[in-house]
Image (cartoon, rainbow, N blue to C red):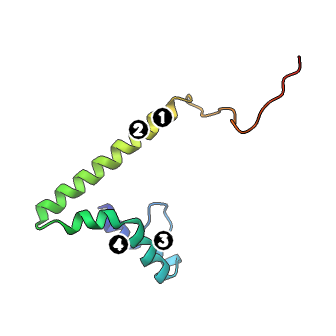
Amino acid sequence: MLLWHTLHGETHSGILTSQVPSHITACSWLISHRDLLERYQECKSAQQVKQVQDAILSELEEDAARRKESLMAYGEDLLVPNPNHFVLQDD
């Protein structure tokens, strides 16, 4: 389904690809999805395509869960001090 949406003018960020010049869109899409295309290219049947799709979706869900878990280490509100700014404390 993700591949279908991408091929039909939708991107992950919600920007329609019709808003971007076609030569840039095609090149960017091929570069950013090369690994997915290589995985699908190895498929010989519809069943294999479905298996690859399920595996990709599973990997994406696991990655999202890991990101969410790492963000939760900071707390619910994500208000943390900026490590690049030092606060001078008066003695």
Q: Quadrant of residue 74?
A: top right
Cβ atoms under marks 1 and 2 closer than 8 Å? yes
Spatial CA distance of label 2 from label 3 is 28 Å
Pair 4/1: label in front? 1
Position of 51 with respect to 2 (left or right) is left
Q: Quadrant of residue 48?
A: bottom left
**Up-down: is 9 above or below 39?**
below
Earlier sequence position, callout 1 versus callout 3? 3
Circle on res. 7: 4
Instruction: State the residue at coordinates (32%, 63%).
Output: 35
Q: Which residue is mark 1?
A: 70
Quarter of the figure with the N terminus: bottom left
Pair 2/3: label in front? 2
Dot 2 amino acid type:
Arg
Instruction: State the residue at coordinates (38%, 72%).
Output: 30
Spatial CA distance of label 1 from label 2 is 6 Å
Q: Which residue is mark 3?
A: 16
Spatial CA distance of label 4 from label 3 is 11 Å
Q: Residues within 10 Å of mark 2 (few under 14, many from 20)?
A: few
In the depicted view, which residue is nearer to us: 16 or 72? 72
Quarter of the figure with the C terminus: top right
Q: Which residue is mark 2?
A: 66
Q: Residues within 10 Å of mark 4 (few under 14, many from 20)?
A: few
Residue 88 pos. (x, y %):
84, 27
Earlier sequence position, callout 4 versus callout 1? 4
- At mark 3, the secondary structure is loop
